[in-house]
């Protein structure tokens, strides 16, 4: 579906009409290096700040799980309509992609995830989740609010700043395991896009600081489900049974030896069994056991090797105990997430822009973790950059970490995320439009 074929025409018309105007008409003192702090001031202004707070609280009350973000998506489209920003919808069920600028290259994307978690909120406050068993406990409500804040700033100022090219706003579903980014990517939203930026709020880093690094920051991740079947019977007459609990216990112990004995100690890897379900009674050996877990690695080679060995160890260790076992590597259709690796050039770009905004002392080094992000599907296809926005205010005390029922967003962090996303995109367009103009004629024809 492509209801937007008329938009390039309109864009060109706008560009024609606005080109005789002097550049930087909003504030003649804004130079390229001043854009980040200029945008931060805009994002902190009551108009933009209160707008983001309102969006974030509204979303916090109506958390929706992956690929079910219907109300969230509707709210986003409503806001884009009001700002006069054209968009494509639906992409990957609930995804929305908006476009600010000329509709011509270069294209730079900024991304927010929209989904919540299947858990009960334990924070008592005015805007607590109204949906039992669902909660925005990872801050994706804040990410959407920040991206809409960035959109507001860019939409109101891209002509004054003489930005050429197009900012692509990516609102994606299902980050928490569903791989919404993969579906968006497969739908072609990155066509002609030169770079993409994503962020995550962090309860570890201080307010006004950001954290990032060049290269791999998050691991490749996969889930697996195991069924070990034996033969149930009387707990006191084991010789007439085949015990799947003992077999499963040995499988877990053997799996732990993969990382400790087969992996290079300097090549970080993890296997965790997080789910073990078997039996109902003290005196009965059950027919089967179900287990589930996750495995992580920092290179795809190590990751695929781990997958191969998990399958072998599970089935062969089960056979030792005369049980049968099967391993399912895509339970609930969860795809493997690739390693999240930050582009070297974009790292330089980030340091420059964030440094201009916050001062270099507020750019912290992010130590890689074995966590995972489906932003990796974007960063696998085109140069990508993923960074963290600090929320911690020491005076107000420690914040619960993501995925805790006590998780809270410090809304004072909203302007930083919004201004950074807007600045990273704006500075990218200013830097790249001249080089693109000469050697690329492509545009988003399907816009
Ligand atoms: C394992 O599978 C084989 C072949 O299907 C079957 O004969 C055997 O009974 C199974 N054993 C258990 C414990 O399920
Ligand atoms: C941290 O919290 C205190 C108390 O609420 C507040 O006065 C202060 O302005 C906050 N600091 C920042 C950087 O926002
Ligand atoms: Zn999360
Ligand atoms: Zn998250």
Image: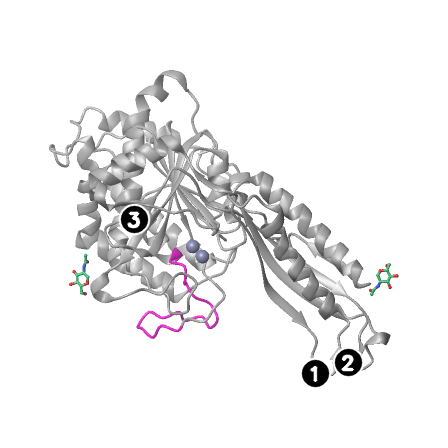
Camera-side residue of 337 and 395: 395
What is the span of residues highlighted in magenta in the rendered image?
Answer: 122-140
Camera-side residue of 226 and 416: 226
- Which labelled disc corresponds to residue 282? 1
- Which labelled disc corresponds to residue 345? none
Residue topped by disc 2: 235
Quadrant position of the C terminus in the picture: top left
Locate residue 411: give its quadrant. Answer: bottom left
Residue topped by disc 3: 417
| 326 relative to 220 in the view: left or right | right
Do the numbered discs 2 and 3 sit on residues whose CB atoms are within 8 Å? no
Q: Circle 3: is it few (<14), some (14-19), or many (20+) Cα within 10 Å?
A: many
Provide the secondary structure element on which disc 2 rests. Answer: loop
Looking at the image, tell me whether mark 3 or mark 1 is earlier in sequence order: 1
Question: What is the CA distance from the residue labelled 3 to the residue labelled 1?
Answer: 53 Å
Query: Residue 196, position in %: x, y?
Result: 40, 37
Provide the secondary structure element on which disc 3 rests. Answer: helix
Q: Point out the frontmost of discs 3 and 1.
A: 1
Residue 263 painted magenta: no
Locate residue 401: give its quadrant. Answer: bottom left
């Amino acid at each position: 579906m492509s209801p937007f074929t008329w938009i390039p025409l309109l864009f060109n018309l706008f560009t024609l009409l606005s080109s005789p105007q002097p550049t930087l008409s909003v504030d003649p003192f804004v130079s390229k290096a001043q854009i980040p702090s200029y945008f931060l001031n805009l994002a902190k202004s009551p108009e933009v700040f209160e707008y983001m707070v309102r969006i974030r609280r509204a979303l916090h009350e109506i958390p929706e799980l992956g690929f079910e973000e219907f109300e969230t998506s509707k709210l986003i489209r409503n806001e884009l309509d009001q700002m006069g920003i054209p968009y494509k919808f639906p992409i990957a069920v609930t995804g929305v992609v908006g476009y600010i600028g000329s509709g011509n290259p270069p294209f730079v994307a900024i991304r927010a995830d929209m989904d919540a978690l299947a858990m009960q909120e334990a924070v008592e406050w005015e805007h607590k989740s109204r949906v039992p068993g669902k909660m925005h406990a990872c801050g994706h409500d804040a990410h959407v609010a920040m991206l809409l804040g960035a959109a507001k700033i860019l939409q109101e100022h891209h002509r004054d700043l003489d930005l050429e090219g197009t900012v692509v706003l990516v609102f994606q579903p299902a980050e928490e395991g569903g791989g919404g980014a993969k579906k968006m990517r497969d739908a072609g939203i990155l066509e002609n896009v030169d770079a993409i930026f994503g962020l995550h709020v962090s309860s570890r880093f201080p307010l006004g600081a950001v954290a990032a690094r060049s290269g791999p920051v998050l691991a490749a991740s996969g889930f697996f489900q195991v069924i070990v079947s034996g033969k149930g019977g009387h707990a006191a007459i084991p010789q007439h049974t085949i015990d799947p609990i003992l077999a499963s216990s040995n499988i877990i112990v053997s799996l732990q030896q993969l990382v400790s004995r087969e992996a290079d100690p300097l090549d970080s890897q993890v296997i965790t069994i997080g789910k073990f379900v078997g039996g109902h009674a003290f005196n009965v050996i059950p027919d089967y056991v179900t287990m589930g877990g996750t495995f992580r690695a920092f290179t795809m080679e190590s990751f695929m090797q781990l997958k191969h060995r998990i399958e072998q160890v599970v089935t062969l260790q089960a056979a030792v105990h005369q049980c049968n076992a099967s391993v399912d590597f895509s339970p609930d259709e969860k795809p493997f997430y690739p390693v999240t690796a930050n582009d070297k050039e974009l790292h330089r770009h980030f340091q420059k822009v964030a440094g201009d905004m916050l001062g270099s002392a507020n750019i912290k080094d992010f130590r890689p973790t074995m966590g995972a992000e489906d932003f990796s599907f974007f960063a696998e296809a085109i140069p990508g950059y993923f960074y963290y926005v600090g929320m911690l205010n020491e005076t107000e005390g420690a914040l619960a970490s993501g995925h805790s029922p006590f998780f809270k967003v410090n809304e004072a962090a909203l302007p930083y995320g919004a201004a950074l996303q807007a600045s990273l995109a704006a500075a990218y367009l200013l830097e790249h439009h001249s080089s693109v103009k000469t050697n690329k004629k492509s545009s988003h024809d399907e816009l």
